[in-house]
Amino acid sequence: EHTQPQVIFIMIGINDVLWDVRDETLLANTRLIVNNLRQTHPQSRIVVQSILPHAGEHATWEGRDRLLQISNGRIRRLNQDLAAMARREGAIFLDLYPLFANEQGQLKMDLSTDGLHLNRDGYRVWATALQLFIGLELDPMQITHQYDPPHGH
């Protein structure tokens, strides 16, 4: 409430999907979060990031059985719905899914520890995507760093 972020990035969804939250509820909750952020930080640009794919049968995550019940097709449809919701609510949608998906639409295992969570390389891809997005899509001259080193010595 007392901060003044210029850009707010949110990524919401995979945990809700894993715990059987209905897609409509996930979308409604995300819309509420975007609207709450808009009211609290009216000057901020809000960026809704896509849900990432999972590795399906290649996953080794402990909740693999739940993961296998969720198709990446459903995640892609949810991402389309999240993109539409973001547009309606005046937010920006950042589709990261293609950066992490292999030819079968599953999470690339070389970017993951267990088929769901990112590893160091996965986080590098994500960080690079955010840096490029800020540089290309947002006006970099309008995005200032929060930390200004002291002048002088």
Image (cartoon, rainbow, N blue to C red):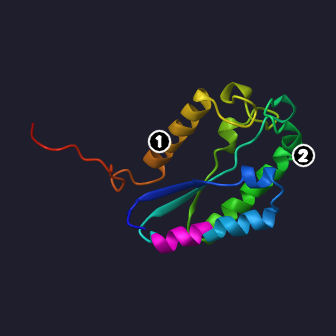
- Alpha-carbon neighbours of circle 1 within 10 Å: few (<14), some, or many (≥20)? few
Q: Please, what is the three-letter code of the amino acid marked with disc 1?
A: Gln
Residue at image point 79% right, 53% down = 17
Q: Nearer the viewer, residue 71 or 120?
A: 120
User: Which stretch did the figure color magenta?
Assistant: 33-40
Residue at image point 69% right, 30% down = 112
Which quadrant holds the C terminus?
top left
Could you say whether the residue bearing mark 1 is in a helix, strand or loop?
Answer: helix
**Residue highlighted by disc 2:** 69
Q: In screen coordinates, is 51 left or right of 44?
A: right
Could you say whether the residue bearing mark 2 is in a helix, strand or loop?
Answer: loop
Image quadrant assignment for residue 102: top right
Among all residues in the image, which is located at the extreme top?
110
Residue at image point 22% right, 43% down = 149
**Residue highlighted by disc 1:** 131
Among all residues in the image, which is located at the extreme front?
62
Residue at image point 58% right, 67% down = 34
Among all residues in the image, which is located at the extreme bottom?
39
Asked if the stretch drawn in magenta spans residue 66, the answer is: no
Q: Please, what is the three-letter code of the amino acid marked with disc 2?
A: Gln
Q: Determine the CA span between mark 1 and mark 2.
A: 33 Å
Q: Position of residue 125 (x, y in %)?
A: 57, 34
Q: In screen coordinates, is 43 left or right of 110?
A: left
Tag of residue 87? none
Residue 40 versus residue 50 in the image, above or below = below
Q: Position of residue 73 (x, y in %)?
A: 84, 48
Among all residues in the image, which is located at the extreme left?
152
Residue 11 versus residue 24 in the image, above or below = above
